Image (cartoon, rainbow, N blue to C red):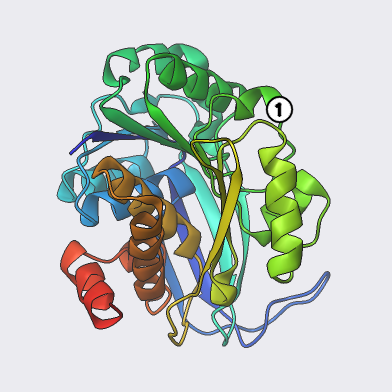
């Protein structure tokens, strides 16, 4: 099995359950308040570790209670945090999350120490990159750092997965270092200008992304499943749709993160693309049935049970 390196954010999530998501200027009286470990990078690292991956995590946390709790949590999941940076000045990142009765959410993030993760810090991890490594990136750390890490990993022969979340406009130069791009529908729309509502619009968006220099695009569409487009050995474009597992969602907060963490594990195990997508979908389906971010990442045996039940 190949190694996994996740580079990204670590936050503490502050979650309020509300009957409906507040609109502009609206105050909604909520129910239960909880705190949980989060951050897209951290969520994906934990999801990958629980799904059976051998994970090293590169992130920045503050020298505070939230940072200490985050590092302790990673240790419990056997994640290597030797290259995590502790910022003595900037506080750890936090996120405020509202979750409604249908499991939908809105999220606001104060990045804190995540913004201090610089390219120079990635240089310290250069020894981790190589043909035997899968590298997973997101966009909650500075774009300069993301681009630098993608190029360094690519140039050293690593397989690079970029989850372009939160949604942001990206230069085509970054895509030449990315092997797999995994946008959701909102992110795909921002990157292409195409609103993704069905297979036809997903096909157009995916082809627009492939035309920008990518070889594999996986658009995650919640209950509509995953639309995949890739270039085969003859440089022809192939496509497939993978339906979602049917579940009752309680909280979709970390579904995309669990999908990406599990996808990285499957690819590190040399599973083919279809197997990797279905493994990632099984993990995501389990995650939406639990409130919270990292706490919702399922263990390997649970993912395998879902896979076996739907074989």
Rendered view: 304 above or below 264: below
**Crowding near pointer 1: few (<14 within 10 Å), some, many (20+)?**
few
- Percent across and percent down for residue 294 are 35, 59
- Number of numbered discs: 1
Residue topped by disc 1: 172
Asked whether residue 226 appears in the rendered view, the answer is: yes
Q: Is 124 above or below relative to 308?
A: above
Compared with 190, 100 (above or below) is: below
Residue 65 picture quarter: top left
Residue 7 vs residue 200: left or right?
Answer: left
Secondary structure of residue under mark 1? helix
Q: Quadrant of the N terminus?
A: top left
Q: Residue at x 35, y 40 (%)?
A: 67
Q: Can you give x and y, in whole percent of width and height, for residue 92 in the image?
A: 45, 40
Does residue 76 appear to the left or right of 246 in the view shown? left
- Residue drawn at x 61%, y 35% is 214
Residue in the image at 43% along x and 52% along y: 260
Q: In the figure, residue 298 lies in which quadrant?
A: bottom left
Compared with 199, 134 (above or below) is above
Q: Nearer the viewer, residue 29 or 223?
A: 223
Q: Quadrant of the C terminus?
A: bottom left
Instruction: Point out residue 160 in the picture as x, y percentages from the top left corner.
Output: 44, 32
Position of 198 with respect to 100 (left or right) is right
């Amino acid at each position: 099995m190949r190694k996994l390196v996740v580079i990204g954010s670590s936050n503490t999530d502050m979650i309020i359950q509300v009957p409906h998501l507040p609109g502009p200027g609206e105050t909604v009286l909520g129910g239960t308040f909880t705190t949980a470990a989060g951050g897209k990078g951290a969520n994906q690292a934990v999801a990958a570790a629980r799904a059976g991956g051998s994970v090293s995590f590169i992130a920045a946390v503050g020298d505070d209670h939230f940072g200490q709790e985050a590092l302790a949590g990673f240790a419990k999941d056997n994640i290597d945090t030797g290259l995590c940076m502790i910022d003595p000045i900037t506080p750890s990142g936090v996120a405020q999350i509202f979750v409604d009765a249908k499991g939908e959410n809105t999220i606001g993030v104060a990045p804190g120490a995540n913004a201090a993760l610089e390219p120079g810090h990635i240089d310290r991890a250069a020894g981790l990159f190589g043909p035997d490594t899968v590298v997973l990136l997101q966009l909650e750390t500075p774009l300069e750092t993301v681009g630098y890490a993608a190029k360094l990993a690519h140039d050293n022969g690593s397989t690079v997965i970029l989850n372009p979340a939160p949604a942001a406009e990206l230069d085509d130069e970054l895509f030449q270092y990315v092997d797999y791009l995994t946008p959701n529908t909102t992110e795909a729309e921002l990157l292409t200008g195409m609103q993704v509502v069905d297979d036809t619009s997903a096909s157009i968006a995916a082809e627009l992304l492939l035309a920008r220099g990518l070889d594999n695009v996986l658009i995650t569409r919640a209950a509509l499943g995953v639309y995949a487009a890739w270039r085969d050995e003859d440089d022809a474009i192939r496509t497939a749709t993978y339906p979602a597992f049917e579940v009752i969602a309680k909280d979709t907060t970390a579904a995309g993160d669990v999908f990406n963490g599990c996808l990285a594990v499957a690819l590190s195990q040399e599973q083919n693309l279809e197997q990797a997508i279905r493994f990632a979908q099984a993990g995501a389906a389990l995650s939406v049935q639990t409130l919270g971010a990292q706490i919702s990442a399922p263990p390997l045996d649970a993912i395998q049970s879902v896979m076996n039940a739907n074989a």
